[in-house]
Image (tube, rainbow, N blue to C red):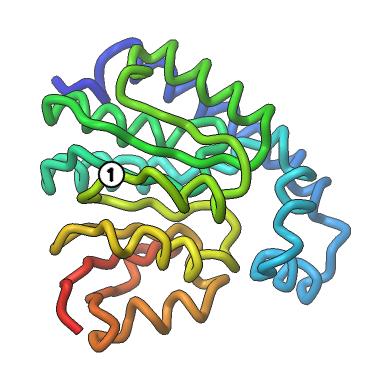
Amino acid sequence: MTTLHEAPVSTLLDRLFVLDETASEAAAQTFGTLSDDEHAALMSSKTAYADLYRRAKDLPMAVSRETGTLLYMLARASRASAIVEYGTSFGISTLHLAAALRDNGGGLLVGSEFEPSKVAKARANIAAAGLADLVEIREGDALQTLARDLPLSIDLVLLDGAKGLYPEILALVEPHLRRGAVIVADNAGWSPDYLARVRSPAAGYMSLPFGSDVELSIWTGSR
């Protein structure tokens, strides 16, 4: 058994995924009045994300169960000890990654979350899972919170915040990536500039789409 499959982590994740599923109706009400063009513009905007995430402050906006398992597996396979997460929300992805850190023997996950109420919920969930000693959540705009005091050598990065800012967040963490570091970008299709960057070997990455909603990349360190 792993930390991911044992209580309290497993039971807490089951409850949070059920919460996420039942929140789908609220999500539809929150964004259902937008046209397709308006929704696309909001999702890819580099300036309107504050409004988007305030409107979604009560929604978990979680990774899928499959993506959560993928995150755990990647962190274990890479023996990660330093992880950066952009977009913590309620902490569902954080729990998967921190469980991997626990099973790897320890480490640190630095997360960033814009919405204060979500920071409080995530911290409570992480504490309830017994993983608080492995996680530091920074409250505020990630362009500021992730611009300082990052681990010297980052093993894994999860991008799951405002999609339009994926290139800017990647630029902040890139100087700290160890060669072979893994970058997982959820719903990266909303950020064509990001995809162009990580799919260009000349930029120092190898990348491919994984499943229906994830871009999986590694930093080759050669450019």
Kindly give the residue lying farthest to the front in the view shown: 148
Is the residue marked by circle 1 packed among few (<14), some (14-19), or many (20+) residues within 10 Å?
some
Residue closer to the observer: 212 or 188: 188
Residue to which mark 1 is pinned: 151
Give the x, y percent position of residue 99.
27, 27
For the residue labelled by badge 1, is the local secondary structure a helix, a strand or a loop? loop
Residue closer to the observer: 218 or 186: 218
Give the x, y percent position of residue 202.
25, 88
Give the x, y percent position of residue 180.
14, 62
Say which quarter of the image contains residue 113.
top right
Residue closer to the observer: 197 or 149: 149
Amino acid carrying label 1: it is: Pro
Say which quarter of the image contains residue 143.
bottom right
Give me the residue at 34% from left, 71% from top.
209
- Give the position of the N terminus as an image quadrant: top left
Give me the residue at 68% from left, 27% from top.
117
Give me the residue at 80% from left, 71% from top.
38
Q: Is residue 30 left or right of residue 157?
A: right
Give the x, y percent position of residue 59.
67, 37
